Amino acid sequence: MKIVYSTLAFLLGTIPVAFGQYATNKDIGKDALMKDSLEALQYNHALPIWGKKAMAKGFSLPYSAGLSVQYVWQQSDIIIDNLQIGFNNGPKTNLDNVIRFDGAKTQTSGANIRPDIWLFPFLNVYAVFAQSAASTSVNCGMWVPDSTGKYKKITDFSTKASFSATTIGFGLTPTIGIGGFFLAMDMNFTWTDISELDQPAYVFVFGPRLGKNIKFKKKDRQIALWAGGFRVQMANNTSGSLNVSDLFPTDQWGSKIESSMQKVSGAQESVDTWWDGLSAAEQKKPSNIAKHDAANVALGKATDVLNQASTTIGNAESSTVQYSLDKRPKDQWNFIVGAQFQINKSWMIRGEYGFLGSRQQFIGGLQYRFPF
């Protein structure tokens, strides 16, 4: 259902952004301290703040400003519930437990541009601008109770669709390095705009990384290797509006509704027959009352939304559906490993792969740095 895949904009907000560059590093040994102290005497850049003092204490600094371009790919599973649907701006019906999702998976790919600066020797700040395309596969069904109180699936929905989105945001990375080892605590805040949503989707990503820089004989050439985690947190509720014709092919819309209405009507007759067949004493039992009331509530919800949907038969092209729902990633955390090859202090190439859990991701990027 496009009702679902249009809500997956949060995944675009979680397009992974590799942390910007090597951490400020303190070399170990008297020779390194003397070397950096001499370089500090010639240090005349505006950023980072306290940069000259850091170099005088034996810390080597990356160039303070940079611009990176990254290609990103991500695949993830999500959990959806508390679905509410209405048609042509009519009242929404809560279909929680009536519409059940068997699985929702999205693939996202795109590019982002990320300017950054070292504000302090231990803090990098950056902005994110991303353009992305995604395809999403969704499987769900309508479930209604019978006379035994057990729910049965009466129809299936399955679709795959594509959409695009624009993401903007900012981030900061507190970091430190000693003897070539570094710890980076990357975090970013992004907002993704997609036309089917009422408002941009907000996402917070936290990515701790622990790694090691390995130097080559050639001056300023080195490689960094790291491992860490990737955690996603988002605003849960999403709402929007879209055309009914975007849900299913218009030639299938009417038959889908009519078939579902017949099955719901049959289930209601089964529940009514069971209830009418009970004795007066049995109808007073709390367990039977609870089962009867729960069945009628669920069947009433299914009937209401199908009755609303039936008014769009024959004019699906001009009809709209309004929705709201809650969503969350199936797994908040996944594991990441990465590497960055520094050609010199200005040019760097990096790659990072995330796996484990229900989310996989890949980043490949090029970065240029310069003193400021």
Image (cartoon, rainbow, N blue to C red):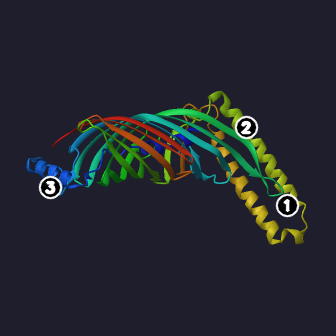
Residue 176 occupies which quadrant of the picture?
bottom left
Q: Which of 146 and 201 is in front in this view?
A: 201
Going from the N terminus, do you reach mark 1 or mark 2 first? 2
Residue 348: image tag: none
Would you name the residue on which mark 2 appears? 258
Q: Do the residues labelled 2 and 3 touch (CB within 8 Å)?
A: no
Residue 194 occupies which quadrant of the picture?
top left
Does residue 11 appear to the left or right of 311 in the view shown?
left
Question: Which quarter of the rendered picture does the N terminus lie within?
Answer: top right
Q: Position of residue 211 (x, y in %)?
A: 38, 49
- The CA distance from mark 1 to mark 2 is 26 Å
Would you name the residue on which mark 3 appears? 56
- The CA distance from mark 1 to mark 3 is 85 Å
How many numbered discs?
3
Question: Is residue 235 placed above or below 8 in the rendered structure?
Answer: below
Front tag of 2 and 3 = 3
Q: Secondary structure beneath disc 3?
A: helix
Q: Which of 327 and 277 is in front in this view?
A: 327
Identify the residue at image location x=74%, y=57%.
Answer: 296
Going from the N terminus, do you reach mark 1 or mark 3 first? 3
Front tag of 1 and 3 = 3
Q: Mark 1, residues whose alpha carbon is within 10 Å: few (<14), some, or many (≥20)?
A: some
Would you name the residue on which mark 1 appears? 275
Does residue 218 appear to the left or right of 228 in the view shown?
left
Q: Secondary structure beneath disc 2?
A: helix
Q: Where is residue 173 in the image (x, y as percent from the top left)?
A: 32, 52
The kind of residue tagged 3 is: Ala
The kind of residue tagged 1 is: Trp
